[in-house]
Amino acid sequence: EIVMTQSPATLSVSPGERATLSCRASQSVSTNLAWYQQKPGQAPRLLIYGASTRATGIPARFSASGSGTEFTLTISSLQSEDFAFYYCQQYDKWPWTFGQGTKVEIK
Amino acid sequence: EVQLVESGGSLVQPGRSLRLSCSASGFTFGDYPMSWVRQAPGKGLEWVGFIRNKAYGGTTQYVASVKGRFTISRDDSKSIAYLQMNSLKTEDTAVYYCTRGDVLSDYWGQGTLVTVSS
């Protein structure tokens, strides 16, 4: 199965600053890559699909890029509601697999 | 408004069975594939499997760790998806989420906790 590796495990950022999260696939997944946000005690929420397309209702401060094996999620100016876990997920080859997550915490 | 509500989670002994239900509303259930995704306590996410809608044959797909033990089904007349879990193991302990979609999950339920322990 395709292994997804996210870095860093924890990212400490001040409100208003920029956050950059990385996701690497063990083999090419083309642009079949999604990002989800999960807050404590809540279900995940789809942010990005197709490596760079924002899902419905997702603010423009969330952007993403990449293809093949290297992907990036950027939050341009962190708001209080953005402190959460973020997971990447590949859907190029079954089984779909998630990265282990990046925790974005308040610095 | 799309809503997915899971039920059926509980404490169960290893080797026993459990069936989870996912009641859907706010969309035409029969037009969409449905998935189950789980999350062990304090851990990441694992896609358990999915069932396509009837237009795509209603076929299913499972992750290797549950194949042969878990079965996903659907009742379009009731807008309910099911996850039948047999021969449960301690490593199946997790919150189980019902989601809409077979490739991407654009809507998620709140999850139901399954604890497998003696």
Image: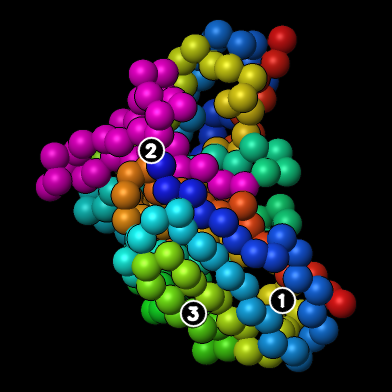
Does residue A96 show up magenta in the picture?
no
Q: Identify which amino acid the numbered label 1 is placed on.
A: Glu
Q: Residue B78: x and y, percent?
A: 31, 38
Q: Residue B32: x and y, percent?
A: 27, 52
Distance between mark 3 and mark 2 Cα atoms: 26 Å
Relative placement, left or right, of B102 versus B115 is left
Q: Is residue B25 visible?
A: no
Chain letter of mark 3 equals A
Query: Do tag 1 and tag 2 residues touch (Cβ < 8 Å)?
Result: no
Distance between mark 1 and mark 2 Cα atoms: 30 Å
**Which sits in the foreground, B25 or B52?**
B52
Q: Identify which amino acid the numbered label 3 is placed on.
A: Ala
Tell me which corner region of the image, top left, top right, bottom left or bottom right, holds residue A16: bottom right
**1 or 3: tag closer to the N-terminus:** 3
Chain letter of mark 1 equals A
Query: Which span of residues is magenta-colored?
Result: B44-73
Distance between mark 1 and mark 3 Cα atoms: 18 Å
Q: Is residue A37 above or below residue A60?
A: above
Q: Which mark lies nearer to you, 1 or 3?
A: 3
Residue occupied by mark 3: A64
Does residue B65 show up magenta in the picture?
yes
Element class at badge 3: strand
Relative placement, left or right, of A67 versus A84 is left
Element class at badge 1: helix
- Which residue shows up at 71% across the image and 76% down it? A81
Residue occupied by mark 2: B49
Residue occupied by mark 1: A81
Chain letter of mark 2 equals B
